[in-house]
Image (cartoon, rainbow, N blue to C red):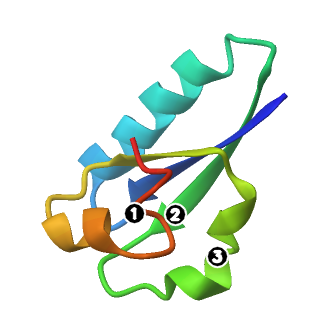
């Protein structure tokens, strides 16, 4: 079973809806163990224990700094 996180931008409705759409599609595969993570710019990624996920889908974030963050850069989709 693949542990997958969906980090969605909680500050606005398009972020929440994007997270819901991604979740709805990913849970259709019975081999996926999918978790939703509410997030915002400036959140402390270390406290989120992101190392336990094989893949991290990030929806409704626009900054490139997320892609270079050492904790999630190798897992982000």
Q: How many marks?
A: 3
Which residue is identified by label 1?
10
Could you tell me which quadrant the N terminus lies in? top right
Left or right of 30, for residue 34: left
Among the two numbered marks 1 and 3 on one chain, the one whose residue lies closer to the N terminus: 1
Of circles 1 and 3, the one toward us is 3
Q: Which labelled disc corresponds to residue 48?
A: 3
Q: Secondary structure at mark 2?
A: strand
User: Where 31 sits versus 14, above or below?
Assistant: above
Residue 35 placed where, x, y %? Answer: 69, 46
Give me the C-alpha separation between circle 1 and circle 2: 5 Å
Tell me, yes or no, whether the two marked residues, 1 and 3, touch with CB atoms within 8 Å: no
The residue depicted at 68 percent of the width and 65 percent of the height is 51
Give me the C-alpha separation between circle 1 and circle 3: 15 Å
Which residue is identified by label 2?
38
Residue 22 placed where, x, y %? Answer: 47, 29
The residue depicted at 40 percent of the width and 63 percent of the height is 10
């Amino acid at each position: 079973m693949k542990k997958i996180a969906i980090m969605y931008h909680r500050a606005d409705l398009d972020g929440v809806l994007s997270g819901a759409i991604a979740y709805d599609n990913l849970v259709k595969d019975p081999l996926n163990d999918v978790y939703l993570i509410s997030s915002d710019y400036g959140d402390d990624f270390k406290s989120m224990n992101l190392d336990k996920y094989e893949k991290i889908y990030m929806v409704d974030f626009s900054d490139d700094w997320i892609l270079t963050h050492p904790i999630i850069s190798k897992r982000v989709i």
